[in-house]
Amino acid sequence: MSNLQIVPATEPDIPVILDLIHALAEYEKLAHVVTASPERLRETLFGSKPAAEAVLAYWDRECAGFAVFFATYSTFLALPGLYLEDLYVKPHLRGNGIGLALLKQVARIATERGCCRLEWGVLDWNKPAIQFYRKVGAMPMNEWTKYRLTGEALKSLALSGR
């Protein structure tokens, strides 16, 4: 796989990262919810307190995809973990092992950091991703349902009972 190179994202990569975010959102039919901007990416990925990290995959010098991840923590194990927020490979470059290489890189980072697990979510309809993840040995956490607070509900909870 001499055509493939995986590198940590740096601040000059912000336009590339934003393009990949938009492409992923289109694929997931979620383009209408993207509000990411270069300024916000600069602050949250490369600012004084980065909230996440990214690695980029290059195939023959073309940016082929990315993985974005951040630290988590298991109280039961008292160990850190990583959460894979996004893994995306451009459609015309799929089937070249790029997604697997990105996932392996994040797994390497997790093991180097002493993480006890690597977790992520996948849309129920995304059968190719589900097959890919099962192929590498990942198992769905069927007994867990992910919940999310956003927007007004988040603000309302934060401000309640003051």
Image: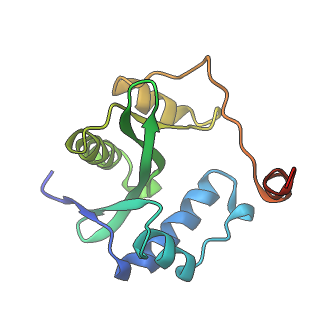
Is 81 displayed left or right of 51 in the figure?
left
In the rendered image, residue 37, in percent from the top left (x then y), is placed at 59, 78
Residue drawn at (59%, 37%) of the image: 126
In the rendered image, residue 11, in percent from the top left (x then y), is placed at 37, 79
In the rendered image, residue 40, in percent from the top left (x then y), is placed at 56, 76
* Residue 141 quadrant: top right
* Residue 76 quadrant: top left
Is 161 displayed left or right of 68 in the figure?
right
| Residue 5 versus residue 76 in the image, above or below | below
Q: Is residue 49 visible?
A: yes
Is 36 displayed left or right of 4 in the figure?
right
In the rendered image, residue 125, in percent from the top left (x then y), is placed at 65, 34
Residue drawn at (67%, 66%) of the image: 34
Looking at the image, the residue that sits furthest to the left is 2
The colour scheme is: rainbow
Residue drawn at (36%, 82%) of the image: 12
